[in-house]
Image (cartoon, rainbow, N blue to C red):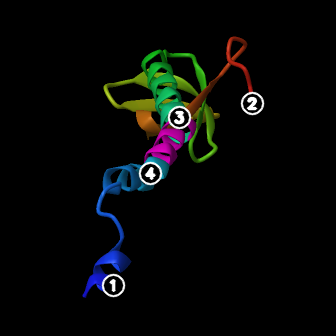
Amino acid sequence: MISVAYAAGPGGGDTMSLLMSVAPLVLIFVVFYFLLILPQKKKAQEHKKMLESLQKGDDVITSGGIHGKVVGITDNVLTLDVGEKVKIKVSREFITQKKGADVVQK
């Protein structure tokens, strides 16, 4: 009976082992946050700002790759002139970028 009690080992130190087992998970979450979540938030804010600044006459590119000029704006719908006598309506959130001299092309 005594040999079984010695085989179990001392009961102290559980707090430190728990902390050491949780620390890698916390570290992974912190790295994940700074490498993935923060840049995505920044990109989303820049996209939102670009969408709010759209005006008539801006040249834009949609998420489908359509290039056009904004000729009409309502709350969430833009009317784009994409060719001779061809106008299409596009939801505002599907505009991916604005073309122009002040915009850096990637």
Counting from the top left corner in percent of width and height, residue 34 is at 53, 34
Give the residue pinned by disc 4. 20
Counting from the top left corner in percent of width and height, residue 90 is at 45, 39
Q: Relative to 69, is 26 on the left or the right?
A: left
| Label drawn at residue 3 | 1
Q: CA distance from mark 4 to mark 3?
A: 22 Å
Give the residue pinned by disc 3. 34
Tell us which disc is closer to us: 2 or 1.
1
Give the residue pinned by disc 2. 106
Can residue 30 be found in the magenta stretch? yes
Tell us which disc is closer to us: 4 or 3.
4
Q: Judge by depth and name the residue closer to the eye, 35 or 4.
A: 4
Q: Provide the residue span drawn in magenta.
A: 26-35
Describe the element under mark 2 as helix, strand or loop.
loop
Q: Are marks 2 and 1 in contact (CB under 8 Å)?
A: no
Q: Relative to 86, is 17 on the left or the right?
A: left
Mark toward the start of the polypeptide (4 vs 3): 4
Magenta segment, principal secondary structure? helix
Q: CA distance from mark 2 to mark 4?
A: 44 Å
Tell us which disc is closer to us: 3 or 1.
1
Counting from the top left corner in percent of width and height, residue 10 is at 33, 64
Q: CA distance from mark 2 to mark 3?
A: 23 Å
Residue at coordinates 42% horizontally, 33% vertically from top-left? 92
As shown in the figure, which amino acid type bears the numbered disc 4? Met
Mark toward the start of the polypeptide (3 vs 1): 1
